[in-house]
Amino acid sequence: MATVAAPRRFCRCACFYTGNLYVARYGLHVRFRGEQQLRRDYGPILRSRGCVSTKDFQQLLAEDAALAPEFLAAAEYSVSPGADIKGLLQRLETVSEEKRIYRVPVFTAPFCQALLEELEHFEQSDMPKGRPNTMNNYGVLLHELGLDEPLMTPLRERFLQPLMALLYPDCGGGRLDSHRAFVVKYALGQDLELGCHYDNAELTLNVALGKVFTGGALYFGGLFQAPAALTEPLEVEHVVGQGVLHRGGQLHGARPLGTGERWNLVVWLRASAVRNRLCPMCHCEPDLVDDEGFSDGFTREEPTTVDVCALT
C-alpha cells in the first residue's frame, strides 16, 4: 500500500512583526524590544540618516512600535533560562492573587489609536460582518479585518504563550494552539453592559483600546461560580493599552457604560490538549463537529500520511 506525505503547512517567523521591523523613512531594518534598546543599538545610524531630534525619535516609535516595552520585557523574561513565576510577577501587576488575575501594558497608545481608526473604517464599510460572539452585538472579528494571521497568531505564539506557561501551567498555558480574537464595542444606543459569564477559552486576554468613556468596569467572581452566588465581585477599571489576564472559567462581566464609547480587544486562548478531554462550556467529553479555521479549538487525531489507495 503506497502512502504519500500529508501536505506541509507553511508558516512565517514571528520576528517579521516584532524583531525585524523595516523603517522605510530611514531605510533600515531594526530589532525592537523597547525605547532604550532601540536608542542603544541604532542611535548612531538613525542619527546619520536624519533621525536627529527628540520629535523625530518619538515619531519613529509611534509609527513602528505596536507592543508596549513592559509586555516585551515580560515575554522576553519568560523564555530566559531559569525564568519562574516569582520573577515574572515582578514584571506584571497582580490584580488578585486569589483569583489569579494579572494586568500588563500590551499595546502602545499610538497603536491603539491606529487600530481604532481601522476598526471604525471597517465598521462604516459595506463589508460583511459577523457578531463577535453570542453575547455582544457590536464589534469586529479580527479575522474579518485580516489581522488574525499577521497580528494575533504571532502575539499568541511568541509572546502570550511563554507568559501563560508560567502563570497558568495547570490550565494549558504552555500548550496554547488556537484562539478567537475579536473587538467588542460599547456605546449609548448599542451594547451598554455584559452580564455574568464564562469564556469559551482556557485563558483570556482583555485589552482596553479606548476611547473616552466612563463606567464599564470589569468585575470578577469565583472560578466556575454560579452567577446567582456572586455577592462581592472584584472590580477592575480599564486602562488604555493595558491587558487583563485571567482564566476563562473565571466568572466575570462588565458594568454599564456611563458615557462615551468603549472598545476592547478580547482574545480567547485555547489549548486543545485541555479541551479535547473536557469541553469548558458543557463540562462533558466534547462531541466533535467538523468546522473551518480554528473553530472552537477542539482537534481530532489526524494521520500523518495519506493512504493513496483509499483515494482511488
Image: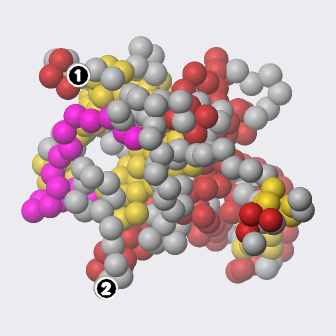
Q: How far apart are marks 1 and 2 (CA)?
A: 41 Å
Residue 25, horizontal then vertical, whole percent: 70, 80
Main SS category, magenta section:
loop
Identity, as a three-letter code, of the amino acid under mark 1: Ala
Q: Which residue is drawn at 38% across and 70% down?
A: 119
Q: Nearer the viewer, residue 279 or 124?
A: 279
Question: Which residue bears the numbered disc 2?
Answer: 126
Q: Residue at x 53, y 30 (%)?
A: 277
Question: Which residue bears the numbered disc 1?
Answer: 226
Q: Residue at x 76, y 35 (%)?
A: 79
Q: Image check: 42 left or right of 229?
A: right
Identity, as a three-letter code, of the amino acid under mark 2: Asp
Please determine whether, in this image, residue 50 is positioned above or below residue 279.
Answer: below
Residue 117, horizontal then vertical, whole percent: 39, 72
Q: Are marks 1 and 2 in contact (CB under 8 Å)?
A: no
Q: Which of 74 and 153 is in front in this view?
A: 153
| Mark 2 element type | loop
Q: Residue at x 24, y 50 (%)?
A: 135
Q: How busy is the neighbourhood of tag 2: few (under 14 within 10 Å), some, or many (20 plus)?
A: few
Q: What stretch is highlighted in magenta?
A: 185-202
Q: How busy is the neighbourhood of tag 1: few (under 14 within 10 Å), some, or many (20 plus)?
A: few
Does the magenta segment cover residue 102? no
Q: Image check: 180 left or right of 149?
A: left
Please determine whether, in this image, residue 134 is positioned above or below residue 194.
Answer: below
Quarter of image, res 259: bottom left
Q: Can residue 39 be seen in this view?
A: no
Quarter of image, res 159: top right
